[in-house]
Amino acid sequence: MSLRWVHESPSFWDADKARIVGEAPSGIFDSRFRRLRLGALVPGDWFHAEDEGRRVVGYGWLDASWGDAEIQVATDPNARGRGVGSFILERLQLEADMRGLNYLYNLVRPTHPQLQATTEWFLKRGFQAVDDGRLVREARPRASIPPP
Ligand SMILES: CC(C)(COP(=O)(O)OP(=O)(O)OC[C@H]1O[C@@H](n2cnc3c(N)ncnc32)[C@H](O)[C@@H]1OP(=O)(O)O)[C@@H](O)C(=O)NCCC(=O)NCCS
């Protein structure tokens, strides 16, 4: 699948986010997403991946604080297992690199219905578990993002 990476700036809660993030099983993301009205501004730096038909097939977003960025990823359940999540992770890494951040991290919530499989998904992609429960990957500062 050929994917296009789109930075949303600003980012609004829309039907695609409601479908892919809002309708994710409870326990994965912040439950406040479910209460957002369509058209509301969403906090954080959001990106989406589009397929050849311009359909949104996944989201990645990051929240940076003190030089580290918490990242989150969600792919359309109908597009899983085809590399969309890996593509989003790589692009988020490049975004973090370009911003001069130190670390990317994800905290798979203990309430995640697929806690172990999702943790392994990050570990397989270069993240390391640290003692506070976060999965961390170092950013690599660079001057610019290569073209998609
Ligand atoms: C985790 C997630 C982003 C993976 O997306 P994806 O588009 O299927 O990712 P990829 O196609 O790049 O990788 C799929 C691989 O991960 C494995 N996998 C691990 N955990 C998985 C999970 N919870 N769901 C689906 N596949 C998972 C698959 O078996 C597959 O393995 P393979 O590469 O050996 O075939 C997606 O399942 C998702 O959106 N889950 C719900 C939200 C979530 O948990 N986000 C992460 C925490 S913020």
Image (spheres, grey):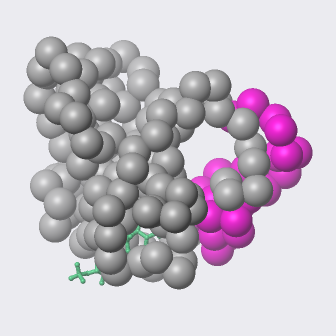
Q: Nearer the viewer, residue 54 or 47?
A: 54
Q: Is residue 61 visible?
A: no
Q: Is residue 14 visible?
A: yes
Residue lying farthest front?
53
**x then y, percent, for residue 29:** 60, 57
Residue 92 in magenta stretch: no
**x then y, percent, for residue 22:** 71, 60
Q: Quadrant of the C terminus?
A: top left
**x then y, percent, for residue 20:** 62, 64
Residue lying farthest right?
37
Horizontal side, residue 69 vs residue 114: left or right: left
| Residue 11 sits in quarter | top right
Q: Is residue 113 above or below residue 72?
A: below
Q: Main secondary structure of the magenta part?
A: loop
Residue 23 in magenta stretch: yes
- Could you tell me which residue is drawn at 24 percent across and 48 percent down? 90
Identify the magenta region. 18-42
- Could you tell me which residue is drawn at 52 percent across and 64 percent down? 53
Horizontal side, residue 76 vs residue 88: left or right: right
Q: Quadrant of the N terminus?
A: bottom left
Count of all numbered marks drawn on residues in the image: 0
Q: Taking the image as four quarters, which one is ligand 1 found in?
A: bottom left
**x then y, percent, for residue 92:** 32, 41
Q: Nearer the viewer, residue 12 or 62?
A: 12
- Could you tell me which residue is drawn at 88 percent across and 45 percent down? 37
- Could you tell me which residue is drawn at 13 percent across and 55 percent down? 126
Q: Is residue 36 above or below residue 41?
A: below
Horizontal side, residue 140 vs residue 7: left or right: left
Horizontal side, residue 94 vs residue 6: left or right: left
